Image (cartoon, coloured by chain):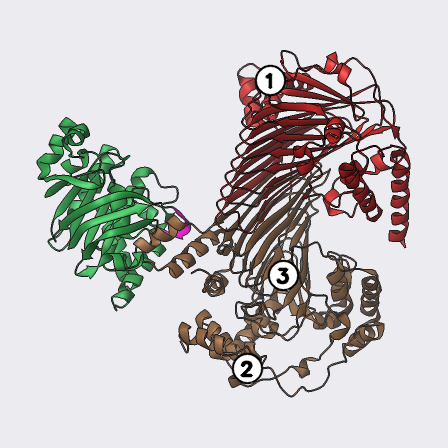
Amino acid sequence: MENINTTIATSEKKDKFLEVLSTLDFTTENPTFLQHRITSQNELNELDFPTSKTEYWKYTRVGKIVNNTYTLGQPEKIDVSDFLIPNLDAQVLVIINGHVVADLSDFTSVDGVTLTSLSHAKKQNFEGLKKHFNQFTQDKKEIFLAFNNAFHTDGIYLEVAKNKIIEKPLHIINITTGNNTISQSRNLFLANVGSQVKIIESFVNVNGEKNFNNHVSELIISENAIMEYNKIQDKKETNFSIVTEQVYQEANSNFTINTATFNGALVRNNLNIEVDASNCETNLNGLYLGKNKDHIDNHTVVDHKKPHCNSNEIYRGVLDNESTGVFNGKVFVRPNAQKTNAFQQNNNILLTDNATVNSKPELEIYADDVKCSHGSTTGQIDEEAIFYLQSRGISKKGALKLMINAFAKDALERISIEALQAYIDNKIEERFI
Amino acid sequence: MAYSEDDLKKELKDQEYKYGFTSNIESEVIPKGLNEDVVRLISSKKNEPQWLLDFRLKAFAHWKTMVEKRWAHVSYPEIDFQNISYYSSPKAKKEVSWDEVDPEMKATMDKLGISMDEQKALSGVAVDFVFDSVSVKTSFQDKLQELGVIFCSFSEAVKNHPELVKKYLGTVVPPTDNFYAALNSAVFSDGSFCYIPKGVRCPMELSTYFRINEANTGQFERTLLIADEGSYVSYLEGCTAPSRDENQLHAAVVELISLDGAEIKYSTVQNWYPGDKDGKGGIYNFVTKRGICHNHSKISWTQVETGSAVTWKYPSCILKGDNSIGEFYSVAVTNHYQQADTGTKMIHLGKNTKSTIISKGISAGFSNNSYRGLVQIHKNATNARNFTQCDSLLMSDQCGAHTFPYIEVKNSTAKIEHEATTSKIGEDQLFYCNQRGISTEKAINLIVNGYCKDVLNKLPMEFAVEAQKLLEISLEGSVG
Amino acid sequence: MIKIKNLHANIDGKEILKGINLEVKAGEVHAIMGPNGSGKSTLSSVLAGREEFEVTEGSVEFDGKDLLDLAPEDRAREGLFLAFQYPIEIPGVSNINFLKTAINEKRAYLNQEPVSAKEFLGMVKEKSALVELDAKLANRSVNEGFSGGEKKRNEIFQMAMLTPKLAILDETDSGLDIDALRIVANGVNKLKSPNNATIVITHYQRLLDYIIPDFVHVLYDGKIVKSGSKDLALELEEKGYDWIKNESPL
């Protein structure tokens, strides 16, 4: 009986979401892309919000998100200067509540680079978009992904032409505003053969409580291409984010993602990387700093399907007050993927007894000639080290700060953009005073 | 040795394994099917007191409301619980003649160095137990009695020590714990009971001399072991000899209670029939094993798992008392089409609690071998420590090795370390051995035994030697 | 003892050995010297039977048998011993157990009885003294946690236990301090007899001050380009390998 009741309850909640979202009008959209929406709307009939029994959501309850009542977030004009990264020379694009706001953006067109809104790209029917849009291998049955597929508004479309190397990073500022708003932004980044690109995306918030951003990005790294994607999540601790990334790597490609999460009532990152070609390198690194009642959940999947690939994963968390950190990293090595080297590491520090960490590093291996390892540690700052620093005249507090900073900064040392590295280091230092 | 390896291989090819155990059954088997009346019938056949019947009925009522969970990384067809007979009296033990016993099994037992008499007994051949162990057993029982140690079948314990059984049964593994624990609680046949009085250090490994009797304890076995304050016991379960059983489903429950200052060392070698090389047949082994540690006490699980078609097993420790210690040492080998999902749970509730997990998985053939473990540090478990090392060794490109640890920490003073590696058996190690004149097969044995040494060292001496041989046999022909 | 004729070998399609000719007789010590990448270690690997290398041409006769036809373990059982440049660690397997297995496998191959425990322990005691190897090391896992010098001494200890007809020492001197070098060389010299032979592969002349070779060969670009007495090693040390490179017709 109990089961039936919860089913009714969750499907009622789903209807509430649908009611709000179905006021969006997509009838003028290019039929190719409209069809994707219709398919996903049909899929939604079969899907329900996860419960405590859903293994994929084992350590994260979505009640906070799904029990709230939302209105649609609208594009606004606001001052974005606070969100710029000091000393960073970048192309700046601004998304507000799932809408690209051109007036606030600051970019110049560059040869060999297509940089526009997703909605414009759909109108133009770009080949690259048609080919790669809405191709998911993991998370197919995820309700939040289906919601975005069916009802996403807008986001950034980036295509880098063959062999084009972009020097200037792209900085996307993805903003939510207002109380109880829902927004669903959507990006697609395509690095064509031999190209190189660096992207930063800041997920921030202005004047709003309990708003919910359900974001999806698709990233395609073609043969021999290199992409670095840096994600900064810094919203007020009353706001909710679910971010899903689907990454495809083609042969000889190199992909790095750095995720720094500083805040959030509920942040869930679903990072799915499919490596369906040989000689690829994949780096996925993350840092999560929880405070108050933050709940930060990182789910990663690296799916090695072909031989001779390397992946390195380091996620680190420092959890203060009553915050919770979740790490669930999965590495698949499929039967064909011989000579895979996969390394996965998760380290956590709890600063109080009311903080929680749940770590689930997983290896699922079906090939024999592989080297895979994972490690997970949870503990305090090494007391010996603290004592050593104290014996050199540093206060205990100072020593602690020094050690936490070092621990946290280590996780993101693969960021290659100096100004960004400095910005993040600075934010870490501000946190642990 | 009666057989050369080649003879054996040839024979295996030519001849499907005969289930061989055709025999005159001396009745006392109740019809197939499961309902409340069957539960009552089992209880009445065993002349059980009302409280135990109530325990069974409650468990059964709960079982009916449960759905079998399928989260483990194993797959097997739906089990028809109405197609199983839940009771057969000891009298009904099937008998076979020595000639009918599977030659493969005979050969394996030869390799393990098991005596002919023992071989016969293990194979279900009726023999008169006139050999040494009877006298050993008697003097053994005298010695235990002197110390106040109770070691008997579960049914005997219910008759002779009902207060102890009543006090502890179901306290560590509640009947509602999981689907198979509930089923076991409703229909358990028999099993072992052990009580070590306060301050007594049990001078011998319990159950070593009883392995012949143990081989037929049935498919729903129940073990209850209580180590009273300050006592110590080392308990051995199972044996290295291959065990054939016509019951495909085995769902045992083991409960350990380690009271203040006590220590229990529980060692298992599991070598149930794994099915043939094409994955046909074999035992489904779904076991719930759990112990509770009170203050300053310790429970150490050591297991060598080579048998069964499907294994689902997580010997666990609830570290309730302050300064208590939990250990889990495991070697799990899967070959051909075997599947194992095994590991442990370490639940840290008390202060200064410590746990160690060493798991060595070896996968060969088309098998799948998963480690699944939970380390949980509760809020009040100040200064809890855990160290986990799980390694997987891959012996073929068709098998799978998986690691699924769950680490949940709610106390800032905890120190948790988990490390896992997965790798192939080293080509350079094999070549080094070859260059010293050691054949590849021998080299694999050496390397595998070396790889498992940390766990094998935890087994009582004579068990360890047999376990080593068992590893060799289990992996025979797995490379090249 | 061993006759190598026109030996060519590839790895991953790349030719490394380009026609080696070498004959070693019982009682002799041969040194093979050469710069990095000349094919020294490839030669020892091919003789020991490493699968990565493909022999494309030539023959090797070992004590009247076609060596290339034998599996690596059978080459060892026939009496070929390779002291590895980088000895392999085998965790959990004690040195003693390892050696006992090796000796008994060899004995079984030669239709001999397995070694008795007493005889074996006597051998261990005697031979470990030869290379001043701490008896404790014999009980530790094979090469695990050994220092560089201990690993090399352990190789010579194994050689002493297995009494090969032909021992190939592959860069045994690399990374050794002078004391260890002396101990290793001393061990090798004591094991020398009119019935066995040794091939010493080295980059430096230093080792040859301790193990005096009867012949010195210079390997360059997959071929033996010069052979001579032990004086050749000294000349080489003095003039450097460039001398050979310049003289080489290649």
Give the label on residue B352, or none.
none
Residue placed most toward the observer, B139 or A43: A43
Q: Is residue B339 left or right of residue B69?
A: left
Q: Nearer the viewer, mark 3 or mark 2?
A: 3
- Using the rendered view, name the quadrant where residue A74 is placed: top right
Q: Residue B311 carries which label?
A: 3
Residue depicted at 74% across the width and 76% down the height = B85
**Above or below, B338 relative to C188:** below
Between circles 1 and 3, the one closer to the viewer is: 1
Which residue position is annotated with label 2?
B129
| Same-subunit check for callouts 3 and 2 | yes
Residue lying at 78% horizontally and 12% vertically, measured from the top left: A79
Q: Residue at x 77, y 58 (%)?
A: B174
Q: What stretch is highlighted in magenta?
A: C88-94
Q: How far apart are marks 1 and 3 (CA)?
A: 56 Å
Q: Which amino acid does label 1 sit on?
A: Lys
When asked about the image quadrant of residue B287, the answer is bottom right
The residue under label 1 is A168
**What hue does chain C carry in this figure?**
green
Q: Position of residue A348 (x, y in %)?
A: 64, 32
Residue type, label 3: Thr
Chain identifier, red in the render:
A
Rendered position, B432 above or below A227: below
Q: Position of residue A73 (x, y in %)?
A: 85, 26
Q: Is mark 2 on a helix, strand or loop?
A: loop
* Nearest the eye: A222 or A175: A222
Q: Which chain is brown?
A: B
